[in-house]
Image (cartoon, rainbow, N blue to C red):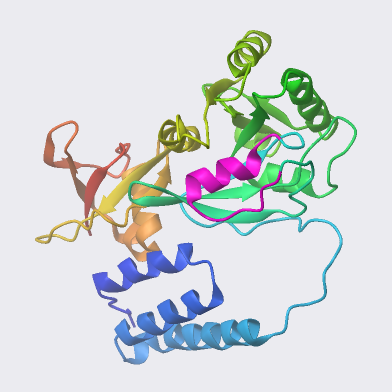
Amino acid sequence: MPANLPPQYFEVERRLKTARTAQEKIAICEELLAIIPKHKGTEKLQAQFKSKIAKLRQESERKPAGAKHGLIGRVEKSGAGQVAVIGPPNGGKSSIIRALTGHEVEVADYPYTTRTAAPFMMPFENIQVQLIDTPPIASDFMENRLPEIIKTADTVLVAVDLGDPEAASSLEGVLAALKEKRIELVLQSRTIPPEKCPFLKHALLVGTKLDAEGAASVLDEIKVLFAGRFGMTAISTASGEGVEALRKAVFDLLKIVRVYSKAPGKKADLTSPFALKSGSTVMDMARAVHKDFALNLNFARIWNRGDHIEGLRVQRDHVLADEDVVELHL
């Protein structure tokens, strides 16, 4: 028997995919239970959510285990993409994250302040991007589980302190340590085959302390030494210079498009887009909404303000652009 779930269900279900805390997930699951029609066709779905709520409550009530040495090997992904922020000791990683997210991050003027990986959410227009603050990397030391976090992340930011005359040397040490783990950072424009994704990562160099004495000459040196290997931007977390440009650069680095769903005869919700990989099609969008939509999709209509497209009928293999509004027809 079909479930016949209302459009509101799928809108709320999307929020569940980006929820971070157990309490937030419980609240969304309870909201979904209230929306689900109560009939025989939805009994299994109702049972799944009730079981999920019970499990989440157990997890939230469980006392935290004692501290463990070393890093967790994986940080659960959340938001529109996951970006690992890496760099040498005192390179400015935590300062970058604080500037981009507004969250307080432990920052100090001595090396190895950050000892464990920690996730933070960066707002960009109407989406959230997950940034992972990581322990520092030196030519002779890297936390043994950090490579797995980098390989799992979608992209990488590399922080380098422009106030340090030895910044270029420190950066070479980071790259050498990564190479020992078979991880290579590459230009954003380079195409990475799917099988190489864990070991080849699009990366952006971020120079910090742009306002420091001598920063301009250090920046020029790095640009010359690493020309053609990475894109680079620079910021001052003290003055805020370059921070908003970096936020946009992070979005571009992820290579995603924001797509909005629209029910026939209704306005699109422009506050909660689907984040899809660049090159995704209408069929990919249908799968993201719900598997039933993908199975029964006939065609779609597209609106895009930038290209002045209004309700154009397209087929399932149509490639979507950023900020397309998609109306799925079954």
In which quadrant is the N terminus drawn?
Answer: bottom left
x, y percent for residue 37: 29, 86
Where is residue 152 drawn, in percent x and y?
66, 47
User: Residue at the location (45% across, 35% down)?
Assistant: 240
Q: Furthest-right residue in view?
A: 140
Q: 299 or 147: nearer the eye?
A: 147
The residue depicted at 48 percent of the width and 81 percent of the height is 26
Q: Vertical placement of 275 versus 28: above or below?
A: above
Horizontal side of 269 relative to 182 (left or right) equals left
Image height of 5 relative to 92, above or below: below
Query: Is residue 82 in view?
Result: no
**Which residue: 56% across, 25% down?**
210
Magenta includes 93? Answer: yes
Image position of 124 with respect to 214: above or below: below
Q: For residue 200, what is the image quadrant?
A: top right
Residue 319 position by quadrant: top left
Of the pair 310 and 16, the residue shown nearer to us: 16
Horizontal side of 243 relative to 161 (left or right) equals left
- For the C terminus, the image quarter is bottom left
Magenta span: 91-108
Which residue, as the protein is rendered here, is positioned at the far top? 224
Apparent side of residue 249 relative to residue 4 in the rendered image (left or right): right
| Count of numbered circles on the image | 0
Q: Position of residue 287 (x, y in %)?
A: 39, 56
Q: Residue at x 34, y 55 (%)?
A: 286
Residue 177: in magenta span: no
Position of 283 with respect to 216 (left or right) is left
Where is residue 132 drawn, in percent x and y?
62, 49
Taking depth in this image into account, of 213 and 290 the one nearest to the observer is: 213
